[in-house]
Image (cartoon, rainbow, N blue to C red):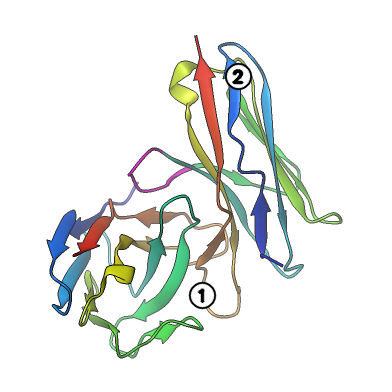
């Protein structure tokens, strides 16, 4: 079983739509969670950290459910510029550094 | 945020040659850097953790004699792909930071390696 799993999509949505991505992780000892955005042939860039209480940044809302071991990302009022691949990341082993374990990513295409 | 650079951004080489990729932290000191690899339509996979002044820690399945890591200073880590083969063609990305659980990691722009 892969440690971090995401629905690969692609998600094709019209501008203005609301879209949600989910991600599950298998290591219950994981302590930190992130959503990254990756544009084609580029490095990932941090979109949001995901905290236990949930957090919001403008049109983006992230939630963490430790009991069910999943995190989610909600994007409201989608823009064309939101088209990208969204990577869920979980820290691998807090006892040996904070490298990240990534999901395969969910592809989002926002259309006019 | 902090800046991490990588060089070269892309490289094409013949099978059997060695390729060195540099990862630099430009405005902070990095005792730890991470090296990832990403194949097309796949996730980033951690290859190794590079520690300044000591040996790198490799993930299971990554050959340490093939992927040589040197972290001789607080601002530079290098990854050398020795005797590269076409199956080593990939996107190699380094990162630094991540010094605590929610400390942001900063990624370099990546190096696209193509082995002919």
Q: Position of residue A98 (x, y in %)?
A: 52, 69
Location of the C terminus of chain B by quadrant is bottom left
Q: Nearer the viewer, residue B100 or A1?
A: A1
Identity of the residue drawn at 47% across and 27% down: A83
Circle 2 SS class: strand
As displayed, is residue B3 above or below residue A62?
A: below
Q: Indicate which disc, 2 or 1, sits on the residue closer to the N terminus.
A: 2
The reply to whether the magenta stretch includes residue B82 is no
Question: Which range is magenta?
Answer: A39-46
Q: Is residue A19 left or right of residue A87?
A: right
Circle 1 SS class: loop
Q: Position of residue B29 (x, y in %)?
A: 28, 67
As displayed, is residue A85 above or below residue A94?
A: above
User: Label 1 lies in what chain?
Assistant: A
Q: Is residue A60 visible?
A: yes
Q: Which mark is residue A97?
A: 1
Q: Nearer the viewer, residue A50 or B57?
A: B57
Q: Which residue is mark 2?
A: A13
Identity of the residue drawn at 24% across and 82% down: B70
């Amino acid at each position: 079983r892969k440690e971090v799993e995401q629905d690969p999509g692609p998600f094709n949505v019209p501008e203005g739509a609301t879209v949600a991505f989910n991600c599950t992780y298998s290591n219950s000892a994981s302590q930190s969670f992130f959503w990254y955005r990756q544009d084609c042939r580029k490095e990932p860039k941090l979109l949001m950290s995901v905290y236990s209480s949930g957090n919001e940044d403008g049109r983006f809302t992230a939630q963490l459910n430790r009991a069910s071991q999943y995190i989610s990302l909600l994007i409201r009022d989608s823009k064309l510029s939101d088209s990208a691949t969204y990577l869920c990341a979980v820290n691998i082993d807090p006892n040996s550094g904070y490298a990240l374990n990534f999901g395969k990513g969910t592809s989002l295409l926002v259309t006019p | 945020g902090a800046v991490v650079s990588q060089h070269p951004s892309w490289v094409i080489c013949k099978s059997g040659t060695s390729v060195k990729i540099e990862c630099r932290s430009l405005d902070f000191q990095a005792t730890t850097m991470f090296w990832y690899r990403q194949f097309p339509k796949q996730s980033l996979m951690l290859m190794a953790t590079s520690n300044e002044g000591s040996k790198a820690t490799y993930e299971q399945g990554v050959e340490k004699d093939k992927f040589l890591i040197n972290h001789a200073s607080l601002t530079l880590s290098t990854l050398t792909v020795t005797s590269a083969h076409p199956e080593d063609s990939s996107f190699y990305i380094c990162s630094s930071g991540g010094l605590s659980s929610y400390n942001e990691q900063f990624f370099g722009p990546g190096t696209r390696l193509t082995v002919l």
